[in-house]
């Protein structure tokens, strides 16, 4: 029975590859801003998706997987109604999301280019602009409804009977959308960030286990690592196994990844003294800004044990932590820490430091505390 | 005829002087004056110095946000035992908006017993109010100010007398009276001679002082609060804005980067503003002598030069004089320039004056306002807040459904930000309390606020604009938008031209009594402010840094943010070091030593080699470089 199911699955994949391949031929040499995603190598897996709100488009999401079964992209073929110049025109295109469900790109058939309200076709720069718009998950289009897009003269009652020449794009939008294609931009943005993307997130979430997370974290793809970090945040059962790896990503040169990794360590995670210690131990390898942010989080989440305070003082002394952070480090000081001989020695040395700022600050802290 | 008139006038003058002197003499013998701010134990009362130029003194205020604060106490000696009449200088701070009894109620206790009636709830201006009479059996007496409401009752001074005469009301006589009864020396104590006296310890003043000190000049830094940082201190809690260490002068802003808070946010917990760092950075400079809690109130001049600044301690009233060849006005209000007769502007210029596109057609007195910021905290249990209704009515339609108020809680745009500033600050307090009272007691959503408690309300208002002292260059809008760069371009301004106006929705509900604002932005490219905006055109030895530099109202919209004002301070410190070395004045630095100044600007005066630690609130996308 299992063998039969396996065979059926393989056959299904074969059908998808063959027909998908034939179908995709019409998208070769298309006007696109990026590489041809349909050319990527891998195994295509079909996910049925009953999208009643978008019944004209394909009711399936195709996933391209690498040899290890990890997602390379998700794609869906769309037929969308876009109302231009009083008529609703059908447009046909592929939309792609990366292996973590973020927008990746689009492809339009060569013989069916996108058109504008004045019936001219999109130029190359328009496709680039459209791609930029679709890349922005917090675009101004997010909160707008179709009726918010243009200024409608009082004489026209039904906005869907608009003539492209009698309505003007809202001034606030004019700079951020493709000229004379505000409806297309709006429709496609909401398609990219609509139900299909939610379904992709669901598919990824369904597959989450330690192996999958390990592979995502090892992918060298920042979007996948970010997905994994955010998923671990939601599935606390994986925290203990993966947090040391997340600490490493704080050092990443990719700002967004580093920030996501740092943001992982919030109130709950910082209840664990071991986590605090490991974070502090890595401080010499973090940026000064990251260190400042981390010290603030330690201050705001219950302070630190003597051992960690000592480590911070050592780092200041050794120049591994910016001396201008010393006032923040001192916010973690507790009077009983002074009973620790090494802390006492370090603080006494700071009282005699060649830098008057260090001396002044230390003197004040010891007096007040 | 004329001679007769002169004789008559002289006779009256003599008579008045004689009476006043006799009064002073008898007053001194049988009376005692106690400044409230000098109480040894302040309890929960705070020292407020913001309006001492207007009403003559700093004072104590019961700032309990609706919860009575602990008593302030002092032990004094009276000249002799016996019956005394007791006068208290106070007033009802809500009187501009509400005709009935005010909320700032308190009692005066002498030797633990209340004297007379409740005080602080009547009077429409600062005045001596007769509290009652008391028998004092021993020369040593304890005084206590006992707050009854936590709603900003205030006391300037207490006067115990065996005589009948009420102390003088007019400021000049009152000042003489105070000085005499407090036994203050006729001449201020000499605080010393310096190379540069910086007045004002906000971000601009601190940066100017550190910059000058690091370049080897002897600096006095005078600040009228016990903490440094001004609007960026934990007393006001406005975060820094703008960019530092940027083109075309990337070495400027290193001091700001060293002293500035690392965490962003307006109206956040006190620790965010890192007062301790600013203070320790200043104290670490051997060349700086810090005079905290001292407010400058007078200057001495010789022709067009300032020779001395006189300041008064806001608690002890001790007066100090500071001598120097150079002074820097970093007061925000341009106080030193004003006292020295420097040319200044205030309000909005008309369009015809500088042809600025954003200027109004006709000049007016409107300025940007001052913010009284606040926040509340969710508690574990329900907490009450008194019903507070003193002339500004809140209802379901106009109430602000918020749990904190930051910069947008801005008042006083149509009032004089100097002469009416106490009223402006008080209106800020009034609307915070009134709105909160409505939310807690009457709102349809009051359940949501049940456990919330006011955790902080500023009593030091964050002022954006008042006097602008005029320099050899007055920076205007077109300089910024058209990128008209001058040869002495120095501190780069990066914030958009950000001008504030009353919020039209707020105007609808509170016409002419708005307390919320909106900001209108116009982007600019990074623009180096000419050094000539940083010194007075008619007071020869006066620098300026901060919001009181030489700009139009429109141009102030960009330069006023604190990272930018800090860089102005750095430039002023540099110029002062050059002026000291060559024995010249601020203009002389431009005319003869601009190359040296540029070289210092290129090097900067940072002490620590550090990356930008404050990448927050840097402003919007920059505009094009035309």
Image (tube, coloured by chain):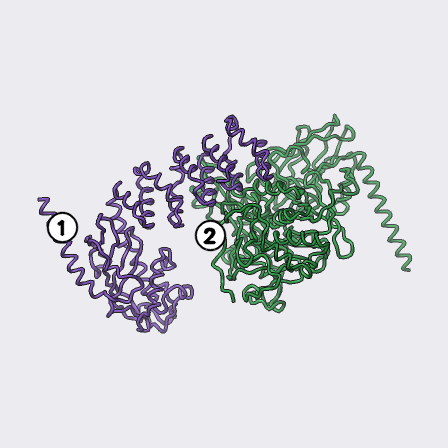
- What residue is pinned by disc 1? A9
Number of numbered discs visible in the structure rendering: 2
Name the secondary structure under disc 2: loop
**Same subunit, tags 2 and 1:** no
- Residue B432 can be seen in this image: yes
Give the label on residue B365, or none: none
Which color is chain A depicted in? Answer: purple
Please provide percent x and percent y for residue B124. 66, 47
| Host chain of mark 2 | B
Q: Identify the residue at image location x=72%, y=53%.
A: B339
Q: Nearer the viewer, residue B524 or B353?
A: B524
- Residue B445 at what x, y percent from top left? 43, 45
Image position of A8 (left or right of B608)? left
Residue beneath disc 2: B397
Q: Which quadrant holds residue A267?
A: top left
Locate residue A281: give its quadrant. top left
Q: Is A93 drawn above or below residue A326 in the view shown?
A: below
Q: Of helix, strand and loop, which one carries label 1?
A: helix
Q: Is residue A122 left or right of residue B262?
A: left
Chain letter for green, please: B
Q: Residues within 10 Å of mark 1 (few under 14, many from 20)?
A: some
**Which residue is at the front of the view, B67 or B114?**
B67
Residue shown at 30%/38% (left/top)? A238
Residue A285, horizontal then vertical, whole percent: 43, 42
Q: Is residue B93 above or below residue B416?
A: above
B387 and A362: which is toward the camera: A362
In depth, the one of A159 and B500 nearer the eye is: B500
Please rate how many residues cluster around mark 2, counting C-alpha atoms within 10 Å: few if below 14, some from 14 to 19, many from 20.
Answer: few
Q: From this viewpoint, is residue B97 visible?
A: no
Residue lying at 77% horizontally and 28% vertically, measured from the top left: B81
Residue A229 vs B503, above or below: the answer is above
Q: Circle 1 marks a residue in which chain? A: A
């Amino acid at each position: 029975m299992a063998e039969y199911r396996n065979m059926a699955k393989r056959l299904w994949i074969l059908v998808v590859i063959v027909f998908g391949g034939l179908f995709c031929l019409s998208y070769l040499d298309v006007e696109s801003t990026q590489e041809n995603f349909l050319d990527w190598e891998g195994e295509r897996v079909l996910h049925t998706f009953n999208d009643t709100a978008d019944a004209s488009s394909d009711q399936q999401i195709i996933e391209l997987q690498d040899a290890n079964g990890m997602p390379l992209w998700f794609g869906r073929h769309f037929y969308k109604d876009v109302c231009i110049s009083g008529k609703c025109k059908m447009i046909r295109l592929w939309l792609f999301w990366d292996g973590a469900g973020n927008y990746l790109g689009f492809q339009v058939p060569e013989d069916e280019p996108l058109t504008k309200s004045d019936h001219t076709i999109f130029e190359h720069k328009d496709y680039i602009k459209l791609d930029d718009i679709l890349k922005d998950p917090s675009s101004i289009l997010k909160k707008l409804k179709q009726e918010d897009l243009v200024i409608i003269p009082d004489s026209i009652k039904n906005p869907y009977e608009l003539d492209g020449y009698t309505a003007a794009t809202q001034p606030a939008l004019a700079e951020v959308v493709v000229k004379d294609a505000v409806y297309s931009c709006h429709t496609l943005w909401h398609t990219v960030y609509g139900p299909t993307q939610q379904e992709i997130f669901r598919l990824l979430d369904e597959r989450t286990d330690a192996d999958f997370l390990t592979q995502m974290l090892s992918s060298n793809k920042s979007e996948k690592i970010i997905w994994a970090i955010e998923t671990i945040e939601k599935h606390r059962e994986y925290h203990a196994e993966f947090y040391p790896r997340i600490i490493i990503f704080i050092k990443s040169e990719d700002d967004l990844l580093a920030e996501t990794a740092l943001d992982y360590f919030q109130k709950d995670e910082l209840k664990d003294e071991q986590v605090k210690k490991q974070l502090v131990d890595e401080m010499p390898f973090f940026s000064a800004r990251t260190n400042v942010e981390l010290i603030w989080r330690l201050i705001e989440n219950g302070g630190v044990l003597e051992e960690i305070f000592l480590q911070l003082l050592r780092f200041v002394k050794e120049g591994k932590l910016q001396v201008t952070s010393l006032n923040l480090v001192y916010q973690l000081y507790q009077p009983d820490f002074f009973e620790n001989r090494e802390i006492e020695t370090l603080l006494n040395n700071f009282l005699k430091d060649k830098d008057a700022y260090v001396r002044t600050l230390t003197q004040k802290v010891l007096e007040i505390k | 005829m004329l001679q007769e008139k002169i004789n008559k006038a002289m006779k009256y003058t003599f008579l008045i002087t004689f009476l006043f002197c006799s009064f002073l003499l008898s007053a001194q013998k049988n009376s005692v004056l106690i400044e409230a701010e000098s109480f040894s134990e302040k309890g929960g009362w705070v020292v407020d110095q913001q309006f001492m130029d207007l009403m003559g003194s700093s004072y104590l205020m019961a700032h309990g946000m609706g919860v009575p604060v602990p008593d302030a106490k002092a032990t004094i000696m009276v000249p002799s035992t016996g019956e005394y009449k007791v006068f208290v200088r106070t007033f009802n701070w809500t009187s501009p908006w509400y005709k009935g009894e005010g909320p700032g109620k308190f009692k005066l206790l002498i030797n633990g017993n209340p004297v007379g009636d409740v005080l602080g709830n009547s009077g429409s201006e600062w005045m001596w109010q007769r509290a009652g009479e008391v028998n004092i059996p021993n020369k040593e007496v304890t005084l206590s100010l006992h707050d009854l409401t936590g709603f900003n009752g205030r006391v300037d001074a207490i006067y115990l007398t065996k005589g009948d005469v009420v102390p003088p009301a007019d400021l000049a006589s009152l000042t003489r009276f105070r000085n005499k009864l407090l036994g203050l020396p006729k001449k201020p104590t000499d605080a010393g001679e310096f190379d540069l006296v910086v007045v004002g310890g906000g971000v601009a003043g601190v940066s100017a002082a550190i910059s000058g000190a690091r370049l080897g000049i002897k600096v006095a830094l005078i600040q009228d609060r016990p903490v440094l940082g001004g609007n960026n201190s934990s007393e006001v809690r406005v975060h820094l804005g703008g960019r530092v260490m940027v083109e075309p002068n990337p070495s400027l802003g290193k001091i700001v980067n060293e002293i500035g808070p690392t965490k962003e946010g307006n109206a956040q917990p006190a620790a965010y503003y890192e007062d301790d760092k600013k203070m320790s950075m200043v104290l670490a400079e051997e060349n700086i002598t810090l005079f905290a809690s001292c407010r400058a109130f007078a200057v001495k001049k010789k022709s067009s030069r300032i020779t001395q600044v006189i300041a008064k301690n806001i608690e002890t009233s001790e007066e100090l004089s500071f001598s120097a060849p150079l002074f820097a006005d970093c007061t925000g209000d341009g106080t030193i320039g004003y006292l020295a007769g420097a040319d200044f502007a205030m309000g909005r210029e008309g369009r015809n004056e500088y042809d600025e596109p954003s200027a109004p057609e006709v000049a007016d007195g409107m300025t940007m306002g001052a913010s009284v910021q606040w926040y509340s905290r969710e508690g574990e249990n329900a907490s009450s807040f008194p019903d507070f209704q003193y002339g500004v009515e809140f209802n379901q339609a106009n109430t602000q459904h918020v749990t904190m108020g930051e910069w947008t809680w801005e008042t006083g745009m149509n009032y004089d930000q100097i002469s009416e500033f106490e009223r402006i600050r008080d209106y800020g307090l009034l609307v915070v309390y009134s709105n909160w009272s409505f939310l807690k007691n009457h709102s349809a959503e009051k359940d949501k606020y049940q456990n919330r408690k006011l955790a902080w309300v500023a009593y030091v208002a964050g002022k954006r604009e008042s006097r602008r002292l005029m320099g050899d260059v007055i920076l205007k809008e077109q300089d910024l938008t058209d990128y008209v760069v001058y040869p002495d371009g120095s501190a780069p301004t990066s914030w958009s031209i950000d001008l504030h106006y009353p919020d039209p929705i707020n105007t609808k509900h509170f016409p002419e009594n708005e307390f919320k604002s909106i900001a209108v932005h116009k982007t600019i490219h990074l623009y180096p402010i000419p050094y000539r905006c940083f010194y007075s055109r008619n007071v020869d030895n006066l620098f300026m840094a901060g919001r009181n530099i030489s700009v139009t109202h429109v141009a102030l919209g960009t330069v006023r943010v604190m990272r930018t004002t800090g860089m102005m301070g750095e430039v002023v410190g540099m110029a002062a070091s050059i002026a000291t070395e060559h024995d010249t004045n601020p203009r002389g630095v431009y005319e003869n030593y601009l190359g040296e100044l540029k070289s210092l600007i290129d090097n900067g005066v940072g002490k620590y080699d550090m990356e930008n630690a404050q990448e927050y609130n840097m402003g919007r996308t920059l505009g094009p470089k035309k």
